[in-house]
Image (cartoon, rainbow, N blue to C red):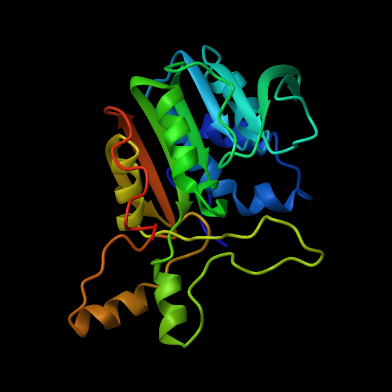
Amino acid sequence: MFSDTYKDIESHIKESVDSLIDNSDEYHNVHRRRYLRTIQVLLDQNPKGKLLELGTSNLLPQCLETLAPELEISVTDFDLEKPAKWEKKIGNKSYEAYSLDLEKTPLPIPDSTFDYVICCEVLEHMEVDPMFMLSEINRVTKDGGTLILTTPNIVSSRGITKMLLGIEPYFFMQYHVPGNYHRHNYEYSIHSVVAVLKSAGFDGLVWTEDTFENPIPETLERLKVAGYDLKHTGDNIFVVAQKKGPVVNRYPKEIYV
């Protein structure tokens, strides 16, 4: 776990997130630092207008209800038994929701609808065609609109340490008992994320941070002494990118054959 979850986090963001996470909520407790940083990154953009969160876990809309009340928020849901478009109750408010498989079904949304799209910890779960989702994000985002995306970094200091020990570097590739589809199917480096973003018509800031676990700087120092000066080794990749135009390459060679 990350030892200093609240490092450099503004107090009102901390209080908002903490008020919504129960101690028994394993998922949100593991991801607490990542949510805090994602919200802070979003608020740094002074967001206004319409925002779509892909694959909501229900926490972000509730936080933004108090932290960015001027945003009009919609969400997607993977419950395919729900109607394609419905009103989802999250906390004390209902949100426009779309139920669909993000890499197979077009979003039932007109072109150029959203000022912001948030896609956090979703990309790595795509099984066969992540560029389908990114192409749809491009379509529903306004020209100049902002995509905020996070995904685990396979080339983190912990991943590198695992490889040096002869262990798979993956973050969350294990199968579940009983079976479900929550495991990661493809874990990215900052280089592959930049490639797919540019292919999808987006460009902007991409960086890494440690939000899940403490880094292992000793490994990086040993590699530096050996002549490898590695960068971008945080365990989470962050993206703040703007839509620059249409999709450039539907099947970038970095992740397709």
Q: Is residue 233 above or below residue 20?
A: below
Question: Which quadrant is home to the N terminus?
Answer: bottom right
Give the image location of residue 71, x and y in percent.
52, 15
Q: Is residue 197 left or right of residue 72?
A: left
Give the image location of residue 210, x and y in percent.
44, 57
Q: Is residue 58 above or below residue 73?
A: below
Identify the residue at horizontal 53%, vertical 58% (top origin): 212
Identify the residue at horizontal 25%, vertical 69% (top origin): 230
The quarter holding residue 256 reads bottom left
Identify the residue at horizontal 21%, vertical 72% (top origin): 229
The quarter holding residue 216 reads bottom left
Question: Which quadrant is home to the C terminus?
Answer: bottom left
Give the image location of residue 207, x and y in percent.
32, 50
Task: Give the camera-side residue of 93 and 20.
Answer: 93
Residue located farthest toward the left when viewing the structure as drawn: 227
Task: Give the camera-side residue of 15 and 26.
Answer: 26
Q: Is residue 25 above or below residue 98?
A: below
Task: Give the camera-side residue of 114 and 35.
Answer: 114
Residue 9 visible to the viewer:
no
Q: Is residue 204 left or right of residue 14?
A: left
Q: Is residue 223 above or below residue 117?
A: below
Residue 219 visible to the viewer:
yes
How many discs appear? 0
Q: Is residue 245 left or right of residue 109?
A: left
Residue located farthest toward the front when viewing the structure as drawn: 257
Identify the residue at horizontal 70%, vertical 35% (top origin): 20
Give the image location of residue 3, x and y in percent.
53, 60
